[in-house]
Amino acid sequence: LSQGGTVIGSARCKPFRTREGRLQAALNLVKRGITNLCVIGGDGSLTGANLFREEWSGLLEELAKKGKIDAEAVKKYAYLNIVGMVGSIDNDFCGTDMTIGTDSALHRIIEVVDAIMTTAQSHQRTFVLEVMGRHCGYLALVSALACGADWVFIPEYPPEEGWEDSMCVKLSE
């Protein structure tokens, strides 16, 4: 828990986007006796978890009809408890103060900036750092503030006409 990053593993699962894939996932959970599921992810993961929850009883019925599980298993696993935790470095999920992953991503960015800062200063060079965040500039903005950046671009506030000249003036100061 103290280590940032996707140490528990992370992967997109194309088959889960289909009913057949979710049917296989349901069979896997029943075979392993799993009745509680914790989903850590962003919009796609949590939407998928909600769909899985909505389809759960129908998936069990379909598995029983196909002879993959018996009626007793349908009763025993009738309820699947799902907890969704927002995990995304974007920090763009409504209703959360900070998503899981944002703080550790910011920490890593600051470490990288610290590592290149002496090179930038000794060689009198300007460095450009790009951070992830998709359509959300939160990580770029807080990174810029934490590291004392001279210039930042964020998608919520696109640069104005002539930004190149303004940036060159600022960086030459």
Image (spheres, rainbow, N blue to C red):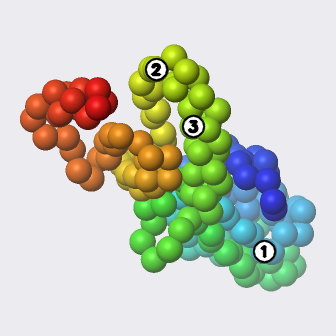
Amino acid beneath label 1: Asn
Q: Position of residue 14 (x, y in %)?
A: 59, 42
Whether residue 16 is visible to the viewer of this picture, yes or no, is: no
Earlier residue among tags 1 and 2? 1
Say which residue appears at 41% left-offset and 42% top-offset: 149
Q: Nearer the viewer, residue 114 or 42?
A: 114
Whether residue 85 is visible to the viewer of this picture, yes or no, is: yes
Amino acid beneath label 3: Val
Say which residue appears at 35% left-offset and 40% top-offset: 150
Q: Tell which tag, 3 or 1, sits nearer the viewer.
A: 3
Provide the residue designation for mark 3: 113
Provide the residue designation for mark 1: 36
Amino acid beneath label 2: Gln
Distance between mark 3 and mark 2 Cα atoms: 15 Å
**Quadrant showing the N terminus:** bottom right
Earlier residue among tags 3 and 1? 1
Badge 2 crowding class, 10 Å Cα cut-off, few under 14, some 14 to 19, many 20 or more, is: few
| Numbered badge on residue 130 | none
Provide the residue designation for mark 2: 124
